[in-house]
Image (cartoon, rainbow, N blue to C red):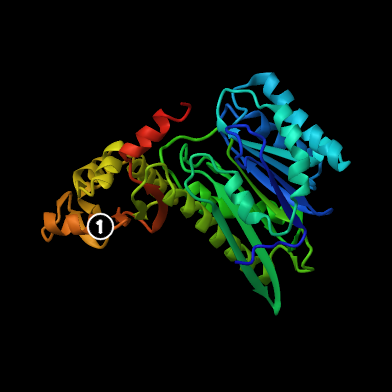
Amino acid sequence: MNTEVAGVQLGVAQAGIKEAAHDDLVVIALAPGTRTSALVTQNAFRAAPAQLAEAHLVLAEALPRYLLINTGNANAGTGEAGMQSAGDCCAALAQLTETDATAVLPFSTGVIGELLPAGQISAALPAALDDLRDTGWERAAGAILTTDTRAKLRSTEVELHRQRCRITGIAKGAGMICPNMATMLAFVATDAAIEAPLLDELLLDAVQASFNRITVDGDTSTNDAVTLSATGQSGIEITAGSEHAEHFARALTTLMIELAQDIVRDGEGASKFVEIRVIGGESEAACDQVARTVAHSPLVKTALFASDPNWGRILAAIGRAGLEDLDTDSVSIHLNDVLIAEHGARAASYTEEKGQEAMAPGDLLIDIALNRGDAEAVIWTTDLSYDYVRINAEYRT
């Protein structure tokens, strides 16, 4: 797969943050003039690097030169000392590259509550810079993982009036996944030229349709961030309201949906990939509310893990989602095209055998029709397994 984005180089090193001889440090170098947009977590306990990245993006006037990413330590819940540590890492990279510290955006992931070892990162930075290359996407995708079992890397070409531009992105995330902006780290770049206001709009719209539609466990991280960088190296300029912008937006959203679904499929201990689709609501917000209630229900998620068509748990979750004046007789539920409930009760055509057959595949669709409007919403989630409990119980041991 061709992943190269003109104007973007990636370098990886081993800082020994979590364990020795393990890729855990990434530097992404952006060509001069590259515009970057970013969204970070809405968790009130935002990690020091998330706060500093936001501040530096403003000071750099959306033209940062480097993204600095580490795994193994979140540098969250570390107070002023954490801000100092994140700042020291940015300063160290700035000194080595003869740029300003505000041109470095830091991002961290890993254990919360432990101070980032700035000295170890600073010592490993020369190796990361020596490793900078156009083809570094694949190694970088592996270096940012924590409990993930596989890298998440996607790339696509967009044809715009006989010209081509590329979009490539990497992401990490498997647990502490519940959208509130975006619940993971993701870094996406394109060689198209896009002005700042449109870049912000494109990122927000794509995130709303992708990373803000996934949940594994209902927990929003302190460190979540997603960036979109446009180098302009292809010579293709995308302007607001143009046909180019529409084509590019579709391609960007598709790529981000693929990355988001990769995260869900790699959810901690997950054995099922579940799409919850709610249609016929009076508003998208109402449909979203129902979908998330079902997706976050431990009883529903454990039934999914057991491949047990316990449709009553889905029914109960819909009923407690908080919709006003819900007419339960109007609600119908399909599980992988099998009608399991309608008119407030089990469907007359439903049998336990049909339900078990519908629950057997690794990919499941729970289709909920409210029949009270034209709005709809979708959420992608997982089941809840023994391994999820084990992975998180042993996370720091």
Q: Residue at x 63, y 69 (%)?
A: 157
- Name, please, the residue furthest toward the front: 21
In the image, residue 194 sits, relative to residue 344, either above or below, namely below
* Residue that mark 1 sits on: 334
Q: Quadrant of residue 109?
A: top right
Query: In x, y percent, where is residue 286?
Result: 39, 46
Q: Quadrant of residue 342?
A: bottom left
Q: Residue at x 56, y 60 (%)?
A: 255
- Mark 1: few/some/many CA within 10 Å (<14, 14-19, 20+): many
Res. 354 visible in picture:
yes
Res. 283 visible in picture:
no
Query: In x, y percent, where is residue 128?
Result: 73, 44
Amino acid found under the numbered disc labelled 1: His
Give the left or right position of residue 283, taking residue 104 as reference: left
Locate the N terminus by quadrant.
bottom right
In the image, residue 332 sits, relative to residue 96, either above or below, namely below
